[in-house]
Structure formats: C-alpha cells, structure tokens
Image (cartoon, rainbow, N blue to C red):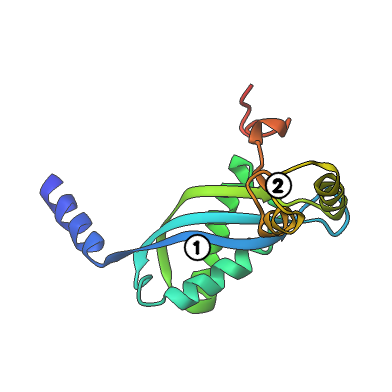
Amino acid sequence: MKKIFALAFAAVMAFAETLNIDNFETDLYSRDAKSSIKKVSVSLRLEGRDVADNEAYVLDALNVVIGSFYVEDLLTSLGKEKFKETLVKYTAKKHSIDIDEVLIISLKTVREPNIEELIEALKNVKTTGSKRSQKEQVEDILRGNKNQLKPMDLNQIDDFGKDFGEQ
C-alpha cells in the first residue's frame, strides 16, 4: 500500500512546476487614513501545473487578488491565509491554472514619507551646515535615501500576530 501511495505521489509531483516571484511591488490601500496608500513588496513561491508556462496570467491574478486586500489585512496570519486561498481560487477560475501551493517567502511594507515629512526634511536641509550641497541632500530625499524610507516595524502594530490567539 505504501508503494502505491508513493508512486501516485511521485506521479503527481512530476507534473508540478515551481514559479518564484521575487520582490513583487504594489501599492495597497491602508485603513490608517482616508485615501492612504502604502507600498508592499512580496516574494512568493507557487507550485502547480503549468505555472511557469503561464507566468503572465499568474502575475495578472496576483495583481487583481492582492489589490483586493488592505495592507493591515495582509499583515495578519489570517489575512495571509485568506490571500493564499483567494489567489488559488481566482487563478483556477479566471485562467484555468491549478496552483497546488502558495508559499509567502517575504512580505514587507515600506513607510514612505508624507508631504509634511518631506517639507520638514527640506527645511532641515537649509538649516544644517552640512558639507554636502543642498542639491545632493534633496536628491537623497527624493531618491528615497534609507534615512528617509524605513521598513515598517511590525512590533509597532499592537494587534500584530494576535489573530490566532497569540499573547
């Protein structure tokens, strides 16, 4: 019996392909404020039949599905599981692509400075006695210098990780 199961499992896995999607970035609505948008970067590993051959359709489905979530929902365990389930169902229904497994390798949000922070940073550029020119400092701000754009600290979210009863 074990041999039959092992052969059946090997036959099914022989048709499975893996598609890695690295650093897929998109803007999602946030519940923080009205019309608030946050940038999200996600890396996924998808396993299923013909996923590599249909990469464009999988990316289309990813765009549609991830856009239907709020940023805060994707940060919870329950939200991640719902995202995986929705992606599998949507690709099967819309594009007839069978995805067996969705693995979230990484999911990051990047806090972008708002207008008030940029104005304050520009004011500080004028008042600081730096050796670098004001033009160079402004270019750093606009380019997203790491001092201006910082990854969101998930520990700052009070309810993060508590959707399955964690303390």
- Front residue (pair 128, 87): 128
Q: Give the secondary structure at mark 2.
A: loop
Q: Residue furthest top?
A: 167
Of the residues under marks 2 and 1, which one precedes in the sequence? 1
Q: CA distance from mark 2 to mark 1?
A: 37 Å
Q: Left or right: 47 with respect to 3?
A: right
User: Can you tell which quarter of the image residue 63 is in?
Assistant: bottom right
Nearest the eye: 19 or 122? 122
Q: Residues within 10 Å of mark 2 (few under 14, many from 20)?
A: some
Q: Is residue 98 above or below residue 122?
A: below
Q: Give the residue at x 69% y 49%.
A: 132
Q: Amino acid at mark 1?
A: Val
User: For this rendering, which residue is in front, 8 or 162?
Assistant: 162
Q: Position of residue 30 (x, y in %)?
A: 77, 53
Nearer-the-camera pick, 145 or 15 = 145
Q: Is residue 62 above or below residue 34?
A: below
- Quarter that holds the C terminus: top right
Q: Is residue 150 visible?
A: yes
x, y percent for residue 21: 44, 62
Residue placed under numbered mark 2 in the picture: 148
Residue lying at 54% horizontally and 77% vertically, measured from the top left: 94
- Amino acid under disc 2: Gln
Q: Which residue is mark 1?
A: 88
Judge left or right: residue 15 versus residue 1.
right
Query: How many discs mark residues in the rendered view?
Result: 2
Q: Is residue 43 left or right of residue 132?
A: left
Which residue occupies 78% across, 41% down?
A: 129
